[in-house]
Image (cartoon, rainbow, N blue to C red):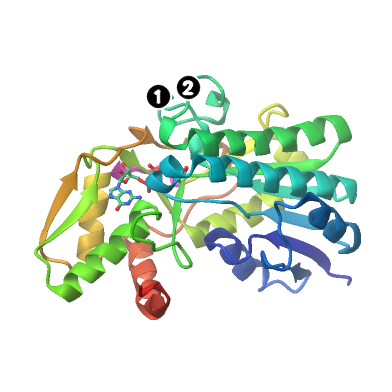
Amino acid sequence: MEKKRVFVAGHRGMVGSAIVRQLAQRGDIELVTRTSTELDLTDQASVNAFFADAHIDEVYLAAAKVGGILANNTQPAEFIYQNLMMECNVIHAAHLADIQKLLFLGSSCIYPKFAEQPMQENVLLTGVLEPTNEPYAVAKIAGIKLCESYNRQYGRDYRSVMPTNLYGPQDNFHPENSHVIPGLIRRFHEAKLEGNSEVVAWGSGRPMREFLYVDDMAAASVHIMELSKGIYQSNTDPMLGHINVGTGVDCTIRELVETIAKVVGFEGGIRFDTSKPDGTPRKLLNVDRLASLGWTYSVSLEVGLEKTYRWFLDNQDQFRA
Ligand code: GFB
């Protein structure tokens, strides 16, 4: 049997590397990957040239410029520019190369800041976005609309998944630019080693977030990509061709922070610095559509945090300043 050639764009990132771990177990798939030095996805000519002769059958578009609330808030130009460029280049070049199937990975921040919770797919574009990540969200909304447009006009089968906040191995543990989980794993770990009595967390601790372990996200992505077109379309409005991926369960940031302290074994105090932004008050996905397509998550937050802390301990040499 001839193997399918599957290109995972962004295979060194947290989500792309998890998708590669899933697909590498399969005998029917030949993985194709390129580092950013080998192929700059923001460069249209290079992307067109790559797709023109790489003989790709399917694409997972997991490449993105990502970061936590502070990175989004301080580098808005990079977040909108790089994400738009990568999406436009990859999706259009895949179409030019006559590739029928592609999966685009977005983000739950595409939904309005004050959307009714839990958020259904159809609340997209019904209200204003959260200002701290609006440029990133606009780029991700453009990605969904690119896929839908090529489907409508050219009959392509380009699908989109919108993950909730993700975490796990290969995450970015930078002290400022990271998301809350890796940022605090590192801060608690360093405070424990240095014997500090207090760790500072950002914001009020009151916002609520939903978290999904990245291997679950990869499993959901492959599941959705491989549904038959009939099943996928019967559950998906052609004008709302994206599917939420999450757990359907959330917690306050305060609860999360306390759980991370427990997992890391930090026994000192926690102070919330309210001069840092809270971001959107709540971001919980409605995952009914995903459930009706036969997928639910398997890694609980506590187990996922333990796995992530273990990975951090095994790889911490790369995070030392
Ligand atoms: O993870 P985070 O940056 O993502 O922040 P967002 C989540 C919440 O945790 C916010 C609080 O209320 C933060 O104020 N928090 C507490 C911290 N301590 C920390 C810390 O040490 N580091 C960080 N980063 N947060 C991002 C978006 O928003 O979510 C992106 O900006 C993307 O565009 C991503 O969508 C999934 O959920 O607020």
Q: Is residue 270 left or right of residue 109?
A: left
Is there a contact, CB below 8 Å, between mark 1 and mark 2? yes
Q: Is residue 152 left or right of residue 224?
A: right
Question: Residue 210: percent from the left, percent from the top?
Answer: 39, 45
Label for residue 128? 2
Q: Residue 284 appears in which quarter of the rendering? A: top left
Q: Is residue 109 left or right of residue 50?
A: left
Q: Earlier in the sequence, mark 1 or mark 2?
A: 1
Question: Residue 27: percent from the left, percent from the top?
Answer: 75, 74
- For mark 1, give the secondary structure: loop
In this figure, which residue is indicated by the disc labeled 1?
A: 114
Is residue 240 among what the camera can see? Answer: yes
The boundaries of the magenta stretch are 247-252
Is residue 293 among what the camera can see? Answer: no
Residue at image coords 9%, 64%: 197
- For mark 2, give the secondary structure: loop
Residue at image coords 22%, 42%: 205
Residue 256 within the segment the image draws in magenta? no
Question: Residue 70: percent from the left, percent from the top?
Answer: 38, 46
Residue at image coords 73%, 63%: 39
Q: Main secondary structure of the magenta part?
A: loop
Category of crowding for the residue at label 2, using alpha-carbon neighbours closer than 10 angstroms: few (below 14), some (14–19), many (at least 20): some
Q: CA distance from mark 1 to mark 2?
A: 8 Å
Label 1 or label 2, whichever lies nearer to me, is 2
The image quadrant where one finds the N terminus is: bottom right
Q: Residue 78 appears in which quarter of the rendering? A: top right
Within 8 Å: ligand 1 and the Cβ of disc 1?
A: no
Label for residue 149? none
Three-letter code, disc 1: Phe
Three-letter code, disc 2: Val
Q: Nearer the viewer, residue 41 or 75?
A: 75
